[in-house]
């Protein structure tokens, strides 16, 4: 199966399932496993440079008229067509975090052999682990994915056991500095699991700047 991943987390999931060898396309941000860097071509690009723009400038660009909520990332549709993927993994959780789902859907509609597009939208830790099974089922390795999910759940349970009863430091996780943007979704659960008390955001929430 030929897989194009348009989300670094999806690339990680494919690798976790032992199918990294089936990846034929990736984002410019996918850097794990390391062997992908030389073997798998990049099909996305950022329209801005974090090296030259500050936090506030990037935020203004995201909210400005130039984008008005659309993705800040471009998809090389010609390269995508040449790769002829069977599956495209993407997301619909954040229009400014990766190539938007609507942009991907529009791109694949013009391909002669339409690939299956799977959008991943986890908001909690359980959702993240369930994505393993969702992707595994699509790629024909559901049993392997279910085993891996249970292994990871067991690891999380062990971390919770080790941190139970200890003093819980109050923790603020920041996703963006200017303007201040606390990290939500699964991050508060990660903090709690590791023994902290998350502030400013609750599990599964979508904080605003």
Image (tube, grey):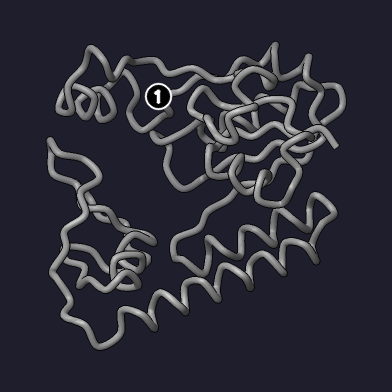
Q: Is residue 191 above or below residue 16?
A: below
Tell me where residue 172 sits by quadrant: bottom left
SS assignment at label 1: loop
Task: Depth check: give the residue in front, 39 or 116.
Answer: 39
Task: Depth check: give the residue in front, 197 or 194.
Answer: 194
Q: Residue furthest bottom?
A: 165
Q: Is residue 59 above or below residue 76?
A: below
Q: Is residue 57 above or below residue 158?
A: above
Tell me where residue 70 sits by quadrant: top left
Q: Residue 15: x and y, percent?
A: 66, 44
Tell me where residue 202 sits by quadrant: bottom left
Name the residue that disc number 1 marks: 72
Residue at 69 percent of width and 62 percent of height: 133
- Left or right: where does residue 145 sit relative to residue 197? right
The N terminus sits in image quarter: top right
Residue at 57 percent of width and 29 percent of height: 103
- Left or right: where does residue 24 sit relative to residue 50? right
- Left or right: where does residue 178 sit relative to residue 75? left
Q: Residue 11: x and y, percent?
A: 61, 39
Circle 1 packing at 10 Å, graded few (<14), some (14-19), many (20+), is: many
Residue at 70 percent of width and 36 percent of height: 88
Q: Residue 12: x and y, percent?
A: 59, 44
Residue at 69 percent of width and 59 percent of height: 134
- Left or right: where does residue 32 sit relative to residue 162? right
């Amino acid at each position: 199966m030929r897989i194009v991943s348009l989300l670094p987390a999806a690339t990680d999931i494919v690798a976790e399932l032992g199918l990294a060898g089936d990846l034929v396309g990736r984002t410019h941000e996918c850097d794990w496993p390391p062997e992908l860097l030389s073997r798998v071509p990049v099909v996305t690009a950022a329209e801005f440079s974090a090296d030259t723009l500050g936090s506030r400038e990037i935020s203004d660009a995201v909210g400005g008229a130039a984008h008005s909520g659309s993705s800040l990332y471009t998809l090389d549709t010609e390269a995508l067509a040449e790769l002829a993927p069977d599956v495209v993994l993407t997301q619909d959780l954040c229009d400014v975090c990766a190539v938007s789902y609507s942009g991907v859907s529009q791109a694949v509609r013009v391909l002669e052999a339409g690939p299956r597009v799977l959008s991943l939208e986890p908001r909690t830790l359980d959702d993240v682990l369930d994505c393993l099974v969702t992707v595994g089922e699509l790629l024909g390795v559901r049993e392997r994915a279910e085993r891996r999910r249970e292994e990871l759940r067991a690891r999380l349970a062990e971390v919770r056991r080790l941190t139970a009863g200890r003093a819980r430091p109050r923790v603020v996780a920041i996703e963006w500095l200017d303007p201040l943007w606390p990290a939500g979704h699964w991050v508060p659960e990660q903090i709690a699991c590791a023994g902290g008390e998350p502030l400013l955001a609750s599990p599964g929430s979508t904080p605003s700047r």
